[in-house]
Image (tube, helix red, strand yellow):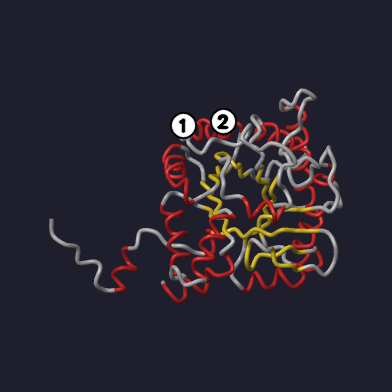
Amino acid sequence: MKPTRLRGNQLIRDLVKEVAISMNDIVYPLFMVEGTGIREEISSLKDQYHLSVDALEKEIPFLKEKGIKYLILFGSPNEKDAEATPAYAKDGIVQQAIRKIKSLDMGMYVITDVCLCQYKSDGHCCKFHPDGTIDLEASLELLSKVALSHAEAGADMVAPSDMMDGRIGNMRETLDENGFGHVPIMSYSAKYASNYYGPFREAANSAPAFGDRRAYQMDYANREEAMREMELDVMEGADILMVKPAMPYLDILRTGKDTFNLPMAAYQVSGEYAMLRLAVDQGIVDEKAILESLIAIKRSGADIIITYFAKEIVRLLEVYN
């Protein structure tokens, strides 16, 4: 086999490059909190912030200057209860944030995380029967109620992250019946019970008060289960399938992309970000490793990448591409 002659010249390399990253691929997470004048750095997530709704007046133009066009919102209310009522309240923190963002920039695309853990006093993503088993019917009703409240507030897309069986079909029916058939659903289809979520749980104040989430999130040893979960979501009407976390599950992402005729999303989660951020800041690895990680995720099949590195990507592309 003859050696390739396509590596020597940068223009040739650019011409034949198989995968490239742009800001059209990138979604940036925002963590909304109650109060005023709040822009506080999250201690476990350097350069990521808790924001009050009024702080969006400066934050949205700032993010737009960074090339960010797509946001996913998470809420952390001051008060929680057993019924997760802050999750679907018309004046809830996420609902307020949606309306504020749209008033500032109608062109900013707003996705909302749909779950219960940040809003329930027990920190779980579902309702339980008295015997401790999951009350699926009540959970699905509540999750669909949350999704509908986000759509009514102006969300462009909803993203259920709970991993309850049947929630996509129930949510799709609820949205359609209420005039929101145009709102797509990006399903956390293969969400693993991962050890990489630690910093996020501080950011969203969503650690469970008892037990863990392995009863409804996936065992990280399982691959075929992920395909079954994706297939069910496709059948129920999901518009986009997500794998979470990203880097440790590139095989799942690739198989999903090859199997299903839907866009694939991958979430480069808080633990992935925190480790790479620390390594770059301490000079252990070059900052080009950030781009390399994103290229790997896209090369594996992601059409959408949710990442905390979004604010740096334009600069990195200009310097290193």
Q: Which residue occupies the foreground of this view, 188 or 9? A: 188
Tell me the residue that label 2 is attached to. 232
Q: Residue furthest left?
A: 1
Q: Is residue 194 above or below residue 11?
A: above
Residue at the (78%, 39%) spot, across then down: 145
> Which image quadrant is residue 11 in?
bottom left
Quadrant assignment for the N terminus = bottom left
Disc nearest the viewer among 2 and 1: 1
Tell me the SS state at disc 2.
helix
Instruction: Pick whichever of labels 2 and 1 is earlier in the sequence.
Output: 1
Tell me the amino acid under the disc marked 1: Glu
Q: Residue at x 67, y 52 (%)?
A: 111
Crowding around mark 2 (Cα neighbors within 10 Å: few <14, some 14 to 19, many 20+) is some
Q: In the drawing, what numbered circle is on residue 224?
A: 1
Foreground: 57 or 276? 276
Give residue 121's quadrant in the image.
Answer: top right
Q: CA distance from mark 2 to mark 1?
A: 13 Å
Label 1 SS: helix
